[in-house]
């Protein structure tokens, strides 16, 4: 199957990689669901489901509580480096146009050098405030958490999509523009694909008979629908593909 996937990539001019927490698992970051996932056990020490705590509504009422949990995610991300999967996806840009649609807020695809990255759930690296102030490339090691706005002293929030919030319109628009142009191959790497806007590009491609590849050690609702399910971890699997391509 790896050989067939490598053949597909050899012929492709435009590729879409849809990625989730599993692509960063090989960088040591926890996933959200599944073994060792952040949402495992569902109840938080505060006795509320994590979806309730990490929500836009809770942020309005109790931003410090939300930051206690976001702070943990941020600390895990801070020391993380891109792994071979991020790097191989970036290196493929030398051969073809590569678009990355990621749910990850860790910025590792950008660190690896991917240029066309749609961060559909936002990024922890930007902060914004209700007063309109924004901070880019935040260095949390030099900030107190929760971070406060230099202009109005309110607690700022990271530019991520919390539960119950809308997806960023710019990201949706970028996805639409790229999808209209079409892809020669669509990958789903390390995501449970629970959200319709994440599974749709893969299912649409499969319907149009565009080659589809899933890289995931487990099964998802996509597994039976893709042309190739590579049942393995992202980093070693992408490395094996790169080798076959002579990279
Ligand atoms: P999940 O935690 O739901 O799924 C992680 C997926 O990665 C699972 O299907 C695992 O089997 C797979 N996996 C685990 N280790 C892997 C590895 N080394 N290589 C490849 N795959 C591996 O994460 P997401 O699908 O990203 O949203 O979750 C989607 C969204 O749910 C997140 O962005 C977050 C959460 O609610 C928000 O916070 C808005």
Image (spheres, grey):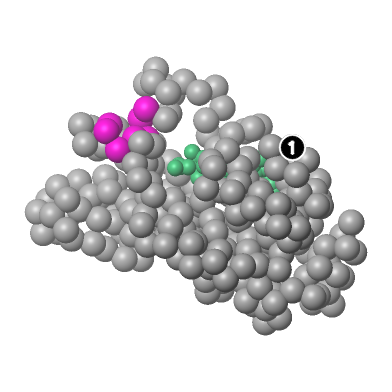
The image position of residue 1, as x and y in percent, is: 89, 56
The 10 Å Cα crowd at callout 1, few under 14, some 14 to 19, many 20 or more, is some
Quadrant of the rendering where the C terminus is positioned: bottom right
- Report x, y in % for residue 73: 45, 44
Residue 53 inside the magenta-drawn segment: yes
**Apparent side of residue 133 relative to residue 193 in the rendered image (left or right):** left
User: The magenta stretch spans which residues?
Assistant: 52-58
Q: Is residue 155 above or below residue 181?
A: above
Determine which quarter of the picture holds residue 59.
top left
Q: Main secondary structure of the magenta part?
A: helix
- Residue 205, percent from left and from top: 68, 56
Residue behind mark 1: 219
Front residue of 116 and 131: 116
- Look at 27% across and 33% down and name the residue there: 57
Q: Residue at x 52, y 30 (%)?
A: 39
The answer to if 171 sits in the magenta stretch is: no
> Quick check: which quadrant has ligand 1?
top right
Can the viewer see residue 197 in this picture?
yes
Q: Is residue 208 left or right of residue 242?
A: left
Against 16, is 167 above or below? Answer: above
The residue positioned 25% from the left and 55% from the top of the image is: 128
- How many discs mark residues in the rendered view? 1
């Amino acid at each position: 199957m790896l050989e067939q996937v490598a053949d597909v990539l050899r012929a492709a001019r435009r590729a879409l990689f849809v990625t989730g927490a599993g692509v960063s698992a090989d960088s040591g970051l926890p996933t959200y669901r599944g073994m060792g996932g952040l949402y495992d056990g569902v109840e938080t020490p505060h006795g509320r489901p994590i979806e309730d705590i990490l929500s836009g509504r809770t942020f309005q009422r109790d931003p410090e509580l939300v930051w206690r949990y976001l702070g943990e995610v941020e600390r895990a991300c801070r020391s993380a480096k891109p792994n071979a999967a991020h790097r191989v996806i970036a290196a493929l840009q030398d051969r073809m146009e590569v678009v990355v649609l990621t749910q990850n807020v860790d910025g590792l695809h950008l660190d690896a050098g991917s240029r066309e990255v749609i961060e559909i759930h936002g990024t922890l690296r930007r902060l914004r405030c209700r007063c309109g102030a924004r901070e880019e490339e935040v260095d949390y090691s030099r900030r107190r958490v929760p971070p406060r706005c230099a202009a109005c002293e309110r607690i700022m929030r990271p530019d991520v999509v919390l539960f119950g919030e809308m997806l960023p319109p710019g990201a949706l628009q970028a996805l639409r523009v790229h999808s209209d142009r079409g892809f020669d191959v669509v990958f789903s790497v390390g995501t449970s694909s629970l959200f319709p806007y994440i599974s749709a590009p893969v299912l649409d491609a499969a319907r149009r008979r565009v080659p589809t590849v899933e890289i995931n050690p487990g099964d998802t609702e996509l597994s039976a629908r893709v042309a190739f399910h590579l049942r393995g971890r992202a980093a070693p699997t992408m490395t094996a593909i790169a080798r076959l391509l002579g990279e």
